[in-house]
Image (tube, rainbow, N blue to C red):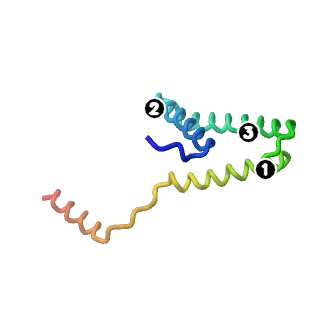
Amino acid sequence: MSDTSSESPSVQFANELIGIANSALEQGGGVDDISAGMRHAAANFSAFACVHMAHSGQTEEGPSPEKMPEHMIEEFARMLAYYLDIHTPQPQPEDPAGGLKDLIEQVKNES
């Protein structure tokens, strides 16, 4: 188990949502359906937050409530790009002797 005491509340909450998604996946849910559901929920609650901040006069650090939708879209795009890099398998360097090893194995198996 990871130490969540040093994580921000938003990261802790995100990790809880990932846990829900992983459980749904283990129960046979489709990756596309789970991902679409998470995006739908994120858009719905984010829209609520924008409207709530605009109408409550809430002034937090960061963009003004009017600029919040653009800020959220840019933030999502940055996070998506970051996590695509994390989840994309990196090519392994080729073993220069790999071709020779494969040939030796092929010859052994043909004998």
**What amino acid does circle 3 point to?**
Ser
Which of the two labelled residues, at mark 3 and mark 2, occupies the earlier sequence position?
A: 2
**Tag nearer the camera, 3 or 2:** 3
- Check disc 1 and report the residue beneath it: 70
On the rendered structure, is 92 left or right of 55?
left
Q: Position of residue 17 (x, y in %)?
A: 57, 36
Spatial separation of the CA atoms under disc 1 and disc 3: 11 Å
On the rendered structure, is 45 left or right of 92?
right
**What amino acid does circle 1 point to?**
Glu
Answer with the quarter of the image where residue 49 lies: top right
Label 3: which secondary element: helix
> Which quadrant, please, contains the N terminus?
top left
Label 3 crowding class (10 Å Cα cut-off): few <14, some 14-19, many 20+?
Answer: some
Which of the two labelled residues, at mark 1 and mark 2, occupies the earlier sequence position?
A: 2
- Check disc 2 and report the residue beneath it: 26
Which residue shows up at 31% across the image and 71% down it?
96
Q: Position of residue 29 (x, y in %)?
A: 51, 30
Query: Compared to 73, does 108 lie above or below?
Result: below
Spatial separation of the CA atoms under disc 3 and disc 2: 27 Å
Label 1: which secondary element: helix
Spatial separation of the CA atoms under disc 1 and disc 2: 34 Å
Which residue shows up at 85% across the image and 46% down it?
66
- Check disc 3 and report the residue beneath it: 46
Answer with the quarter of the image where residue 15 lies: top right
Is residue 110 or residue 3 the one in the foreground? 3
Is residue 94 or residue 40 the one in the foreground? 40
Which residue shows up at 77% across the image and 50% down it?
61
On the rendered structure, is 100 left or right of 46?
left
Label 2 crowding class (10 Å Cα cut-off): few <14, some 14-19, many 20+?
Answer: few
